[in-house]
Amino acid sequence: MTLKTRLAFGVASLLALTITLLSAAVFGLMWWSMVREVDARLADTANLINADTRFAVLPLMQSRYHVQLPELDFVRASGIEVQVWVKENGTYAPVDSSANLEDWPNALDPSTLGREDAHTFSTVNIDGTWWRVHTSPIWFGASAIGCIQVAQSLEIMNSVTSSLLLVVLICALIALAGSAILSRWLAHRLIEPVQKLTAAASHIADASDLSTRLPWHGPNDELGRLISVFNKMMERLQQVFNVQQRFVADLSHELRTPITSIMLNVDLMKKVGADEESLSAIYTDTERMSRLVNDLLMLARADYGGVSVHMTPLDADEVVSDAVRASRPLAEGKGIKLALAHIEPLRIYGDVQQLQQLMGNLISNAIKFTPEGGAVSLTIQRVGCMARIEITDTGIGISPEQHERIFDRFYQVDPSRTQDGTSGFGLGLSVSRWIAESHDGSITVRSQLGHGSTFIVSLPLIDAEVDANHPSRQTTHQKLPRVRLPEHPTSR
């Protein structure tokens, strides 16, 4: 059974149950109201007869009573029959009745004779006709000396209720048929967007068409939000697919070039022997491929938590200073001024090598996208309970639509916009963001196209509250291990 059929069946069943209960409630309420009306008329008639009845005790016969009744045919309402019974020698004997019951010897309801309840109602069948009977006692002093039975035929009421029942059944059947049609239509309307999603997903799976989008002109309800999320997901998948396609093409080119160079140099060395220039070229190409493999391996391990971060207390200002010293030859070779604009002594927990790799990536990026004669400056200062490191360049800047995408894996800006015309692998900033987040920090960018960029790294301080009360701590003179950073720029 399909979801559409189950939904239609469920809605129809719920509507059918509701209509059935409502019909039963309407019919029951009408029946109860008519019976109450009949009971009220019977009770009023009995009270009227009882109020106009006179009693007398016959002399010398304490068990015999003389009962003077009003004219029953005058006090009873139309359609109501009356019987009056008096107790004689422990049994009940009839003393009077309405004209229609003069030839009827039996009590209207023998089972209720002798009851002393003020009002006893019962429904009995007399010669195939249903009657509603009201029995009430006749009191003389503290003794019940007889009873009055008042009855009304239910034939008219049963006829009315039968007609009502027929009308209710017809209306219920019509409503059930309408509910079945409505539930089927409603199920179709609800399932149609899901069927379109299924068809779109099937089309994507069969044709690998990531450009498929679903139109939606309805309200922003659950289905509207589902289709919106699906379209956003497809847009994101298309972006990732395009980036990966471009990465595969770029990676093929990046690997083919050094591999070709290595093969040519090796072939040359086979013919004329090894020389310093060939060995240096082979080393450079091998180092470039090694960096690519290491970055890919690191990100792959980070995806499943396979990269360990050895957190130790260290001076963030020392990490920044070492990164600047290691990157200065690269900046000087391109005619770029690299300097520390502002530095504060701050303590953090971190992995020395990973933080140096983070700083090296950001500084080399800044140098790569800064023209000759430009400047790259670094600052480190306290902002609340965080150490804030800013790397600012006077380079080409980043367009607003690229601010978030530059941290995606394999994403690269146009190589023609770099100052040396080279492109990287698009992994440097992805690695940098992972390092920052693995240290409970963050990395963001503030940039305007043509006006340079500022990358901001925030890392939590050690004992931030204690340090806040002692801002004048002197910088330690114990140097951290010096690690040589790559002299080749990574890409954004």
Image (cartoon, rainbow, N blue to C red):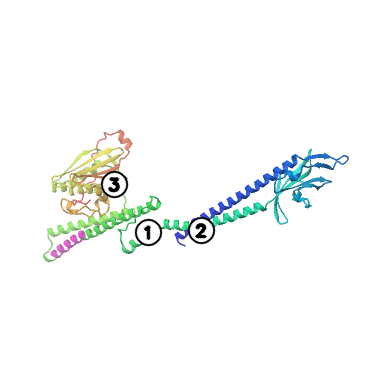
Residue type indicated by callout 1: Lys
Span highlighted in magenta in the image? 253-269
Gap between marks 3 and 1 measured at Cα: 42 Å
**Residue projecting furthest to the bottom:** 271
Gap between marks 3 and 2 measured at Cα: 64 Å
* Magenta residue check for 256: yes
Residue type indicated by callout 2: Ala
Estimate the x, y position of residue 329 in percent, counting from the top left. Answer: 15, 47
Q: Residues within 10 Å of mark 3 (few under 14, many from 20)?
A: some
Estimate the x, y position of residue 128 in percent, counting from the top left. Answer: 71, 57
Mark 3 = which residue? 436
Residue 26 higher or lower than 384, as above or below: below
User: Which is in the foreground here, disc 2 or disc 1?
Assistant: 2
Estimate the x, y position of residue 315 in percent, counting from the top left. Answer: 26, 41
Mark 1 = which residue? 196
Mark 2 = which residue? 177
Disc 2 is placed on an element classified as helix
Q: Who comes first in sequence, dot 3 or dot 1?
A: 1
Q: Residues within 10 Å of mark 1 (few under 14, many from 20)?
A: some
* Magenta residue check for 20: no
On the question of residue 479 being in view, the answer is no
Disc 3 is placed on an element classified as helix
On residue 152, the disc is none
